[in-house]
Image (cartoon, grey):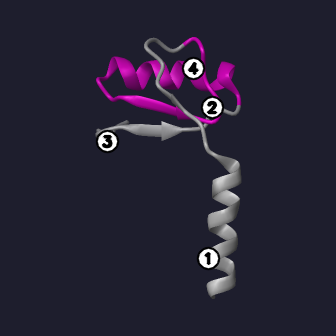
Amino acid sequence: MAAKPTGIMISAADPEMMTPDINAAMAAGIPVITMDSDAPAKPSPVLRWTNNYQAGFMAGGLWFRS
């Protein structure tokens, strides 16, 4: 947060541990987006989910092209 990023995107694998840091970032005016795992205690959550089927399909295509 000291670098003042324009935003943070994380996967909150342990919501209890991550929520204080997420809230601190948001209090500092840094938008936070959680991905695949939410931290429900954070205000105004924005949550994105990975389409694992599509991600696997794309990864397989990249692997076969190498």
Inter-mark Cα distance, 2 to 3: 18 Å
Inter-mark Cα distance, 4 to 3: 18 Å
Q: Is residue 2 left or right of residue 34?
A: left
Residue for point 63% across, 36% down: 36
In depth, the one of 31 and 20 nearer the eye is 31
Q: Counting residues from the N terminus, which is met first, the one under dot 2 or under dot 4?
A: 2
Percent across and percent down for residue 42 are: 51, 15
- Residue indicated by mark 1: 62
Task: Tell me if residue 63 comes above or below residue 5 in the rendering.
Answer: below
**SS class, disc 1:** helix
Range of the magenta residues?
14-41
Q: Do the numbered discs 2 and 4 sit on residues whose CB atoms are within 8 Å?
A: yes
- Residue indicated by mark 2: 12
- Residue indicated by mark 4: 19
Inter-mark Cα distance, 3 to 1: 30 Å
Mark 3, Cα crowd under 10 Å, few <14 / some 14-19 / many 20+, is few
- Residue indicated by mark 3: 5
